[in-house]
Image (spheres, grey):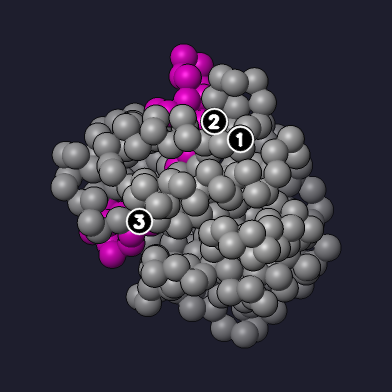
Amino acid sequence: MQNRKLGRSDLEIAPLVFGGNVFGWTADEKTSFDLLDRFVDAGLNAIDTADVYSRWAPGNQGGESETIIGNWLKKSGKRNQVVIITKVGSDVGQGRIDLSPAHIEKAVEASLKRLGIDEIDLYLSHWADPTVTHVETLGAYQRLIEKGKVRYIGASNLDAGQFKAALDAADHHNLPRYDVLQPAYNLYDRSEFEGPLRDLCLAKNIGVISYYGLAKGFLSGKYRSKADFGKSPRGGDMASYLNERGLRILAALDEIAVSKNVTQAQIALAWCMAQRGICAPIASATSLEQLESLIGAVSLTLSDAEMKRLENASAL
């Protein structure tokens, strides 16, 4: 397994990132600890979370995922073995998306405290905030980098125009640039990244960590009809995938998974890992069985014919 460098940074990550959105939601603390231990023992090293995870769950306020990761870091002593990625800007009580310097400076302290660390390896702007200029936001990040609270910065959910504007602002004002982009991307959701955004990332040497690597679980193959929506808290999100194209993709995944004696999830992640410009997809697991499947994807290689079969099945 060869680690991949994130853009111009000195951060190197294994080709699969653990999605921490499940911690404190569909995975309790003990389960989360077991998953993280196994993930690192398998030679993987990057954990993605956000200050807002998992505010949407009943009884939660946000920060639950970071708190669990922090507790695990303290108990395991594995801080030096992992790359911690977290995000800022989502509504965690302020009532709006917020990338203002005042909010960032407050939010980073809260994240550092929950994580129990002195420095965040990679800090991402979670969403675009049209009320704040890139210069203001990047200036806030510059101060955090200078203080040793953040090593590198990136952004999530920006389109090509927004991302180019941020890169240009960094260049023109001698500010730190976003070295990493985190877009939604998988075998079903391809249009956001493929095209101008990917071209920009390749041209500017941007590290790309894609989220929804399994399309919220759809590409695992467990959702085949409306009757399957009750299988997980995310079942209600499957309606948009369960169509002619989605079923065509599942059929291709089924065919290749059977021929290679692996899971559909492994095929879907291996396809994503092989895509031009992608450093690593993010995927979540709520059980060790699920995690073993994800780990297996790292060593899986798809043939040209198999890649073509998936490309044809997922064509828009």
Q: Is residue 186 left or right of residue 80?
A: right
Q: Is residue 313 left or right of residue 60?
A: right
**Secondary element at tag 3:** strand
Q: Earlier in the sequence, mark 3 or mark 1?
A: 3
- Where is residue 112? Give x, y as percent: 35, 37
Which residues fall within the magenta stretch?
38-64
Q: Which residue is mark 2?
A: 103
For the point 68% across and 63% down, the residue is 172
Q: Which residue is mark 1?
A: 100
Q: CA distance from mark 3 to mark 1?
A: 25 Å
Q: Is residue 40 left or right of residue 136?
A: left
Q: Is residue 11 above or below residue 118?
A: below
Nearer to the camera, 270 or 221 = 270
- Where is residue 207? Give x, y as percent: 54, 67
Q: CA distance from mark 3 to mark 2?
A: 24 Å
Residue lying at the far top of the rendered structure: 59
- Where is residue 102? Give x, y as percent: 54, 31
Residue 54 visible in image? no
- For mark 3, does the 10 Å Cα neighbourhood hold few (<14), some (14 to 19), or many (20 or more) residues? many
| Quadrant of image for the C terminus | bottom right
Badge 1 vs badge 2, beta-carbon distance below 8 Å: yes
Q: Which residue is mark 3?
A: 83
Q: Amino acid at mark 3?
A: Val
Magenta stretch holds residue 43? yes
For the point 39% across and 33% down, the residue is 109
Q: Earlier in the sequence, mark 3 or mark 2?
A: 3
Residue mark closest to the camera, 3 vs 2: 2
